[in-house]
Image: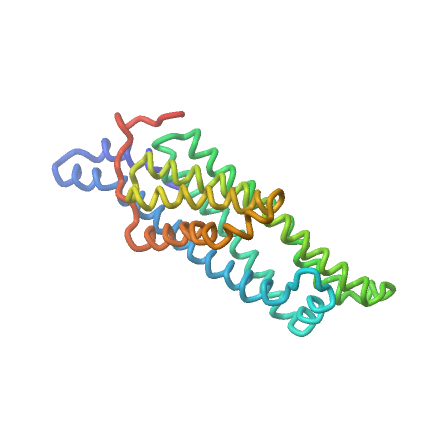
Amino acid sequence: MRTLEDEGAQTSAAATGDGALDRGADAPQRTAARLARLAGALLLVMTVAAIFAEVGTRAAMFVAGDAHETATRILAAPEQFSLGFVGYLVAFLCDVPVAILFYALLRPFTRTWALTAAAFRLVYTAIVGAVLLHYAGALIVLQDPGLAALGVAQREALALSHLQLFDAGFHLSLVFFGVHLTLLGALLLRARLLPTALSALVTLGGVAYLVDNIAYFIAPAVKATLGPVLAALAMAEVLLALWLVAKGVRWRPPVGGRIRGA
């Protein structure tokens, strides 16, 4: 991937005339715009895939505390349940290039913190990718003829347990995602690539993820009370995606043209 530093170096080499200088000066802006719009497009794909998987599939079939009803809904539409797995998988696969794209975009401003933000997103992806096996496991224990020795009630209870473990693992992974989003918003604020309000909203969205998903484990009452507010703040990433696709970023070279934290 061509980096913004590469474009900056090419700018100097290309400046052999007024026209060449103009074209070279625009190179970092064009590269930043491409990185931003690609990241935004992938974020939108992730959003659609995740909403389908979470709202259209899992939320429609998972009945907390009711193993029989959950199993009945899954077995009534196993193809839809499997498509939910695909939706999650598509969303999580997109997270990897998004982490790399944001790193490439922010690296000229602070390499260390850009790498740290990317690392937290990749750790989130690794955790949630692993716990996705529990989602698949729910259908396996309900349909696998090799488990026929188990009673129906036992298999239904196992399926519910798999979905509960997926739910807990998902919330755990989102703590790491919350750290990523908080850092991302702070870095965007520092780099001034986006309107200040949007960057601040992304930062608040990250904090909302942290509060919401830590509360899941230690303070369920807080999660229930603040859930709607935190969910609204968490939508900041969707606004970020729409802005990046529609507007891109306003490229401002680092002070002195040097990388900080290299």
Residue 5's x, y, as percent? 33, 33
> Residue 253, can we see it?
yes
Q: Decide if residue 136 is on the left or right side of residue 148.
A: left
Q: Decide if residue 177 is on the left or right side of residue 29.
A: right
The part of the image, by quadrant, that contains residue 19 is: top left
Q: In this view, which residue lies farthest toward the bottom?
A: 76
Q: Nearer the viewer, residue 11 or 245?
A: 245
State the residue at coordinates (72%, 56%). 161
> Residue 128, can we see it?
no
Residue 186's x, y, as percent? 38, 36
Locate the N terminus by quadrant: top left
The part of the image, by quadrant, that contains residue 21 is: top left
Which colour style is shown? rainbow
Q: Is residue 56 above or below residue 132?
A: below
Q: Nearer the viewer, residue 16 or 171?
A: 171
- Numbered circles on residues, count: 0
Locate the C terminus by quadrant: top left
Residue 252's x, y, as percent? 26, 36
State the residue at coordinates (68%, 54%). 164
Q: Decide if residue 225 is on the left or right side of residue 104.
A: right
State the residue at coordinates (35%, 55%). 242
Q: Nearer the viewer, residue 60 or 257?
A: 60
Q: In this view, which residue lies farthest toward the right?
A: 149
